[in-house]
Amino acid sequence: MDSMAKHASSRRRTKEHHVSIRVTEAEAAQLERVAAANKLGVATWIRRTALIAADREDPMAAHQQAVAAIAAIQKGITPEQARRLREARERSE
Amino acid sequence: MTVVLDASVLIAAMERRETPSRRALLELMAGVAAGTQPRPALSALTVAELLRGVAGDGDLADVYRPVLATCTVHDVTERLARHAAALAAAADARGLPTRDRPGLVDAIVGALALDLDAELVATDPDFRALPGLRLTVLPEADS
């Protein structure tokens, strides 16, 4: 359990990058136009583009993780474990 | 298209029986493995909901670890919290019975789906009360 939480935390640390970029007024206007064309705010559009790019940068990692996930889904959990998870979720509502 | 997964579907999909959720999650992960589908997105609160139930069960943690590792987890920002509050308030204004009103966690998951312009997949029908979602509610079992 602890290792699972640490793993999730580690993923966040390695995946999140906060950067500042200086752009001209013309570039800012262009960013806003592209984001608006996608019906998104500028920050959301940039974040989504970065996520798609990250997946493209390391398709093998995504492939290997997805294959492991498929094996885990096929292994599955017991009805009792599912019941405990549902109860925990209901307590969180 | 990006898919946001709710905890309800991540629980139903993992149970050892043939369900629409199980088929949907297997298909989704097969798409990620093939490079034709982006990683599913999760709210950090969905991770918390699952880990709360996983606590103290090492086998359960082992099963969920690779599934969570394949997903992209999104933090709850103040902007998302404000969006979620507005969504929940809109649902409240519909005057639904209390039991059918989505909770704040559901509203945050819904707001994340809207923020990412993603499809939200769940088994919990309470999400239907949140306006503007591209939502798929999977049945708990085959009819």
Image: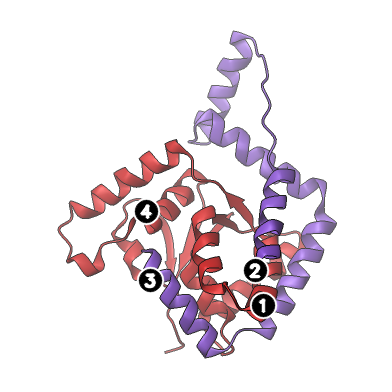
Chain colours: A purple, B red
Q: Residue at x 49, y 76 (%)?
A: A85
- Which mark is in front, 4 or 1? 1
| Residue B48 position within the rendered picture, expressed as x and y whole percent measured from the top left | 52, 60
**Contact (CB < 8 A) between labels 2 and 1?**
yes
| Residue A84 position within the rendered picture, expressed as x and y whole percent measured from the top left | 48, 80
Residue A87 figure quarter: bottom left
Element class at badge 2: loop
| Residue A93 position within the rendered picture, expressed as x and y whole percent measured from the top left | 36, 64
Question: Which chain is indicated by disc 2?
Answer: A
Element class at badge 3: helix
Q: Residue at x 40, y 57 (%)?
A: B105
The residue identified by callout 2 is A1
Mark 3 neighbour class, 10 Å CA radius: few under 14, some 14 to 19, many 20 or more: few
**Residue B107 numbered tag:** 4
Can the viewer see residue B5 in this picture? no
Circle count? 4
Question: Which chain is indicated by disc 1?
Answer: B
